[in-house]
Image: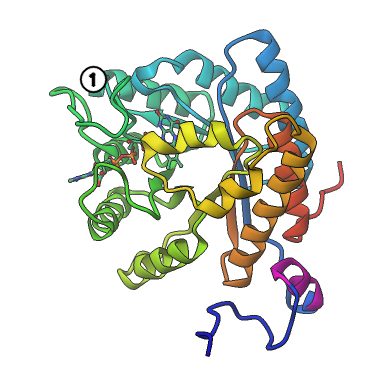
Amino acid sequence: MNAPSPITAPLGSALGPIARAGQRHALRRAPQSLSFEFGPPKTPELEETLWTCIRRLEPLNPDFVSVTYGAGGSTRGRTHRTVKRILEETSLKPAAHLTCVGASREEVDEVIRGYWNAGIRHIVALRGDAPGSLGGAYQPRADGYANATELTAGIAAIAPFEISVSLYPQKHPESPSIDHDIDVLKAKVDAGATRAITQFFFDIDAFLRFHEQVRKAGVTIPILPGIMPVTNFNGLQKMAGPCGIPLPDWLGELFEGLDNDPDTRRLVAGSVAAEMCARLQEEGLSDFHFYILNRIDGADLAYAISRVLGVRETAA
Ligand SMILES: Cc1cc2nc3c(=O)[nH]c(=O)nc-3n(C[C@H](O)[C@H](O)[C@H](O)COP(=O)(O)OP(=O)(O)OC[C@H]3O[C@@H](n4cnc5c(N)ncnc54)[C@H](O)[C@@H]3O)c2cc1C
């Protein structure tokens, strides 16, 4: 006899989580929190693409949109300009990522104060990786913040920011264990973190087990699963490998032979991400963070998936 499925599917139902959600329409609730992550653009052309993505997603009225920060401050000016423009020209609430690797406390504190003075009230506090050392040995600067926990405390000491931090459902590559990562998260909460955003993942059962472990450890802040709508599996492999993110065989198989067929890849990407999100929603997750990577197809997919989750546009 087959082991019972962990999924809460009605017995004999052939429906997947999206259709089941439709069936239980009356019980269904749109996500409590939706957020999108972008990168600071390098060129005027890329800036235009970014703004196409932002304008596409703005009507969904996300809780916040975040802008990444290059390790060592390499995008300091661009990140600052981008969050400031979002604040000034849109109805969105920007969150600025900030890393502490390769910088002194004084330099990082100056960036934090700069954000506060520019009207930014939300920072995503990260350690970052030294260039070329992703997943390798990390050497903190003697006069710098040693890790994201120290950075979180530093930000909280400067001004009452909302502070989001990272979380790794399948372990940070340098961490000895998931338990250690959860201890680190608890230390970040004690230091002032108000929300955790996870690394992207594709193993939903592993994520759900991890989520349960985090809650059992007494962490109550919102945990946003990081969703990466994937249209290019080869690109994903390059990104996931150094971050220690396992990619399931089934995902590779879905994209097999589609290298020259971007339209089908987009459709496959949309189905995978929508099924993942609908399943998480069915399991009670109510907050979602989408990695857009400034790709217009990423924004299109996030838009479609948000609708599948029950989000509707707000009136202009
Ligand atoms: C949502 C999200 C957004 C990101 N955005 C960016 C970005 O904008 N720019 C960028 O460069 N990178 C970004 N990253 C990547 C991140 O910088 C790397 O994953 C980096 O390796 C770790 O950063 P962290 O903030 O998770 O570090 P930390 O939380 O400091 O953890 C790093 C390692 O140190 C260990 N550790 C932490 N504190 C302690 C302690 N007190 N004692 C012992 N061990 C400890 C942890 O277990 C872990 O193994 C992002 C990651 C995520 C998940």
Where on the picture, by quarter, is residue 138? top left
Residue 66 visible here: no
- Extreme left residue here? 142
Numbered disc 1: secondary structure: loop
Label 1 packing within 10 angstroms: few (<14), some (14-19), many (20+): some
Q: Is residue 257 left or right of residue 79?
A: right
Above or below: residue 70 compared with residue 215: above
What residue is at 79 percent from the left and 42 percent from the top? 59
Residue range corresponding to the magenta coloring = 16-23
Q: Position of residue 27 (x, y in %)?
A: 74, 78
Residue to which mark 1 is pinned: 104
Image location (x, y in percent) of residue 156 = 33, 41
Q: Nearer the viewer, residue 76 or 137?
A: 137
Query: Can you say which quadrant of the picture contains the C terminus?
Result: top right
Left or right side of 194 for 156 = left
Looking at this view, name the residue that lies furthest to the top: 44
Q: Quadrant of residue 84?
A: top right
**Residue type, mark 1 in image:** Ser
Q: Quadrant of ligand 1?
A: top left
What residue is at 50 percent from the left and 52 percent from the top? Answer: 248
Does residue 22 show up magenta in the picture? Answer: yes
